[in-house]
Image (tube, rainbow, N blue to C red):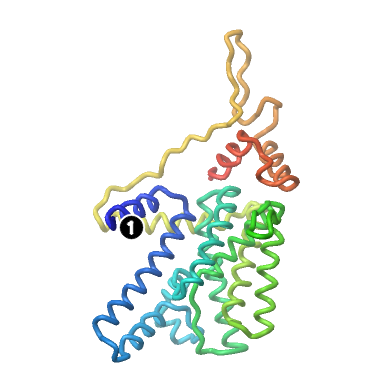
Amino acid sequence: MIQSIWEEIRREFRHGNMVTRLIIANVSVFVLVWLIYLLMLLTLGHSGNHHTYFDKMIEYLCMPADWKHLLLRPWSLFTYMFLHQEPLHIFFNMIMLYWFGRIVGDFIGDHRVLPIYLIGGLAGALLFFVFANAFFDADAIMLGASAAVMALAVAAAALAPDYLMRLILLGDVKLKYVVAVLLILDLVAIGKESNTGGHVAHLGGALIGGLFVQQLRAGNDWSAPINRLLDKILQLFRSIKGQPRKRGPHVVYRNPVKATTEAGGKQRRKPSEDSNGLSYQEQLDAILDKIKQSGYNSLSTEEKEFLFNASNRK
């Protein structure tokens, strides 16, 4: 059974979308952390030393507010956003990652999900560091994917504010209201001085989510340099392992509304035009306008397929 589960997880990680991979990464770290705790408990017994060693390990992975600790542990800028200790903490973060990450991937491409996650997490860490040293506890530490997830949440709301989300007990709610409530809750928590550092970090991630979409619309794709860097890192690991250099997958994009050349010899339409002579961008704009007015579920099968293909264009 364990072998079957492991093989299925590996298959999902290799062939699933980036949201699936991020969820698997976060859950894997969570499980690994608690397996290490269990091992310490069994090895050291109930002397209490296992708590000390476990807390020290967690501390080395968390984002510190102390600049000296940060200089000694620069990896914590990234490890903290994949680290959770409490089951409810990771559960709600992964639920929101699934909701908002899929929307972002559908609208602007799966290849932009990870960059937004990473930039949002880094922005949250920076804001936490600044505010902790300026206003509250410079010895504080932070962990969790919340800042990175908030970046995806605000990006999703900026892309499709009227996208309808079906919530338990509430029914269909527009995405912009869901995200607005999350931001208001963060502001209230900061005012009450409840987990101030964490909620400040959420706002840092949220800011990046909005700026990312704004810059993308202006023609500046912040994800491009990050994806190039990640590709180089992957190629480096492959060369170290002795694996041959892999070329990127060859993907053929097709227009769901195909032109056909009939036996009578009708002229074939340009691939960038539909049956009404609309350009690719005009078709995409029309679909996005329809989503804003009536929600994603109002799209036809052909329109959903067109949007999916558009989201994977680089």
Q: How many marks?
A: 1
For residue 46, above or below residue 143: below
The image position of residue 1, as x and y in percent, is 28, 55
The image position of residue 244, as x and y in percent, is 28, 48
* Residue farthest toward the right in the current orientation of the protein: 293
The residue to which callout 1 is attached is 236
Residue drawn where x is 58% and y is 31% of the image: 256
Helix or strand or loop: what does disc 1 sit on? helix
* Residue farthest toward the top in the current orientation of the protein: 264
For residue 263, above or below residue 143: above
* Residue farthest toward the front in the current orientation of the protein: 169
Q: Amino acid at mark 1?
A: Leu
In depth, the one of 92 and 231 nearer the eye is 92
For residue 266, above or below residue 90: above
In depth, the one of 128 and 191 nearer the eye is 191
Residue drawn where x is 55% and y is 39% of the image: 309
In depth, the one of 72 and 144 nearer the eye is 144
Residue drawn where x is 57% and y is 48% of the image: 106
Left or right of 128 in this view: 177:
right
Residue drawn where x is 26% and y is 86% of the image: 45
Left or right of 287 in this view: 265:
left
The image position of residue 92, as x and y in percent, is 54, 67
The image position of residue 191, as x and y in percent, is 69, 83
